[in-house]
Amino acid sequence: MSGDSPVFAAAAKLAHHGLDPAQQSQLAAVLEALASDEHAPTTVHDPQLAADVHLADSLAALELAAVRDARNIADLGSGAGFPGLPLAVALPHAHVSLIESQRRSSEFLARVCAAAHVENASPVWTRAEDWNEGLSSNDLVLARALAAQPVVLEYAAPLLRRGGTLVDWRGQRLVGEEEAAERAAASLGLRRVEVLRVVPFAGARDHHLHVFVKQKDTPPGFPRRAGMARKRPLGT
């Protein structure tokens, strides 16, 4: 892709994350796929806007050492590939599993990984509760705009190794929701260690990364069968 194209220029805005020109080109290819693929599972197709609300928002997690140091990463409910796909580009030493339950979205992820030459990311067409291959094997689990936080915690806990980290993207902080999440975390062997406010792009408001660490093995009975976490959330 030409270095003077508008799409590449949008991706180049992210160079401050330590991305070299090859990585910027990969992100430009992601933006191109969002703009040109009619099946891209997002309402944001404009490259300039997508560079902010998708790419920059995803890469904000690089502020966390647990993200930068992770080797095995799972992105739950990956959708159009965020936050997992940009982080796979930024972290070539890591492998990112893009967990997506919708077949069409998973097929899109396969196309965009191929187009952007992101060889360290793998779409996995399954529900988080049914991904037995991922149990207790991930250093890091990511979730962005996926579900209520107690639900995200239940999805993530069985997939993390002991000592692993969950990073959950949230908007405005709500005391009641955080209290429910604390109760759910205690039931799952997790502990919230940080809530990091981030400003991934100019004008961004109420962006927070909620960071949990798995301190104990996941109790027996988890994961519950598919759908139960949403139907009967823990901690509520």
Image: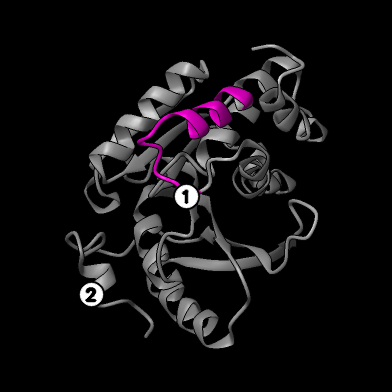
Find numbered disc 2 in the image and state the secondary structure of the residue it sits on: helix
**Front-lying residue, 34 or 26:** 34
At x 36% / y 68%, what residue is drawn? 151
Q: Residue at x 63, y 25 (%)?
A: 28
Q: Which mark is residue 231?
A: 2
Residue 33, magenta (yes or no):
yes
Mark 2 / mark 1, whichever is N-terminal: 1
For residue 91, say whether it is visible. Answer: no
Check if residue 75 falls in the magenta segment. Answer: no
Q: In the shown orientation, is residue 129 left or right of residue 7? A: left
* Residue 222 point in image, percent of width and height: 26, 62
Asked whether, in this view, residue 54 is left or right of residue 200, the answer is left
Circle 1 SS class: loop
Query: Residue lying furthest top in this view?
Result: 2
- Label pair 2/1, CB-CB below 8 angstroms: no
Q: Is residue 54 left or right of residue 143?
A: right
Amino acid marked by disc 1: Thr
The residue wearing badge 1 is: 43
> Is 198 situated left or right of 160 in this image?
right
Residue 155 seen in this snapshot: yes
| Residue at 66% over, 40% down | 51
Query: From what the image shows, is residue 96 above or below residue 188?
Result: above
Residue 200 drawn above or below residue 196: above
**Percent x, y for residue 9?**
75, 27
For label 1, the crowd category at 10 Å Cα-Cα, with few meaning under 14, some 14 to 19 and many 20 or more, is few
Q: What residue lies at 62% left-to-right and 36% top-to-bottom? A: 47
Image coords of residue 169 (percent x, y): 57, 59
For this rendering, which residue is in front, 66 or 219? 66
Magenta range is 28-43
Check the image and report above or below for 206 versus 74. Answer: below
